[in-house]
Image (tube, rainbow, N blue to C red):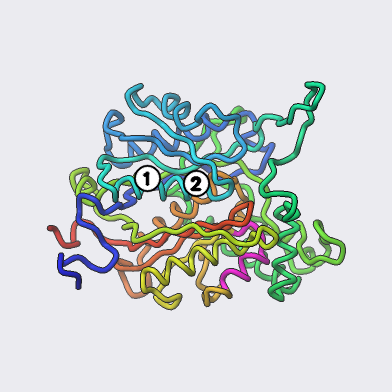
Amino acid sequence: MPADGLPPGQLPPDRQPVVIAALRTPIRRVNGAFKDLRAHELLAPVLRGLLDRTGLPAGAVTDVVIGNAVGGGGNVARLASLEAGLPVSVPGVTVDRQCGSGLDAIVLAARLVAAGGGGAYLAGGVESISTAPLRANRAADGSPEFFRRAQFVPLSYGDPDMGAAADNVAAAFGISRDRQDRFSLESHRRALAAAAAGSFTGETVPVQAVSGTVASDDGPRARLTAALMSRFPPVFAEGGTVTAGNSCFDADAAAAVVITSVERARELGAADGLLVLGTDTAGVDPRVLGMGAAAAAGRLLAQQGVTAADIDLVDFNEAFASQTLACLAALGIDPERANLDGGALALGHAYGASGAVLVTRLLAQAREPSPAGSRAGSLALAMISIAGGMGTAALFRYERLDETRRE
């Protein structure tokens, strides 16, 4: 025990970041139920829901920190904050680390708390791929040259698409087509079971769309079978193993958390939360960009003196089965222990929101009693790989705030 009497990795109560609430919208396929809602309209119900859930006064929010990858700019955090009815005195800042944006927004807010920034933050991510603006470079004559996606790295690296990089990972780490397909099927099975058990209900905010109230995800497929999976052809490389079946689909969604200090959390009457023990972001070769999460998580666990066996809950963004299996193997984490309620292969990948969805899922899972009883003291790991060859990871410990040591 350190000289200050605090457990390893824990800061004094006035600077120890803790996530006390987390909510998300349903995750819906692109051009589906949310096709008419812009990013700020998706995020606003989540922000309002968090204030209602915690009793945090709107005027007491220190800042709104939101990740977004393919939006139209203009600081969606500020726009959504005002759309949600927060007073004009509350500022907002938007973070872009592509697929990692939502988790990196939470990391930024945690570091602000740890640095003595005080207060309470709304942090997370949002993506409305359905309403993302068309993007173009300006040609020499001034005419627009439209492009499908932004450039991630210099062309000397090949600037591979994420799917092509997933095939690279499968080849480099020996992840067979059969393993990828079986893992994807299991993700759907777990997500369907979790939905049937009501596991997503408490973390999901219904959203009013043009078609009516949307209250559930639409990704998990009950009719998906091994025979059907085997019929999907390779998508990204001739003779490759990455298919539409073992890849995620694009989705629209928003997710956010309330993150504050343990001291402020107790003042708000929070009973429990995820203490942020540490975070890290790492870079890898962009040609195997899916391995970024393993690099970040491996370094983070070493810094914290934690092994894979010590982790109780793991949520990894399943952009592709190949990279998920390769990263888990690199970290020594059994896939049976990760993404207990399924992941992006079944639920969908809403770019800037997905990292915040991971934290939302971990808090919900931590609050569910294990066969041994309360999960207090459990370690939880969120990690996501990022376009351009990066990854972000965050390590949490679930604690009862009304039972932890008061300094």
Please name whichever residue, 130 or 158, is drawn nearer the observer in this view of the structure. Answer: 158
**Placement of the N terminus among the 4 image quadrants:** bottom left
Q: Is residue 290 left or right of residue 87?
A: right
Q: Position of residue 109 (x, y in %)?
A: 37, 45
Residue 192 visible in the displayed image: no
Residue drawn at x 52%, y 68% is 338
Q: Is residue 230 left or right of residue 70?
A: right
Q: Nearer the viewer, mark 1 or mark 2?
A: 1
| Position above or below: 304 against 25 | below
Which residues are drawn in magenta?
Answer: 318-328
Q: Earlier in the sequence, mark 1 or mark 2?
A: 2
Q: Position of residue 208 (x, y in %)?
A: 53, 31
Is residue 203 located in the magenta-colored stretch of the structure?
A: no
Callout 2 amino acid: Gly
Residue 25 visible in the displayed image: yes
Q: Secondary structure at mark 2?
A: helix
| Position above or below: 223 against 50 | below
Q: Is residue 359 left or right of residue 36?
A: left
Q: How many circles with numbers are drawn on the protein?
A: 2
Quarter location, residue 374:
bottom left
Q: Secondary structure at mark 1?
A: helix
Name the residue that disc number 2 marks.
102
Name the residue that disc number 1 marks.
109
Callout 1 amino acid: Ala
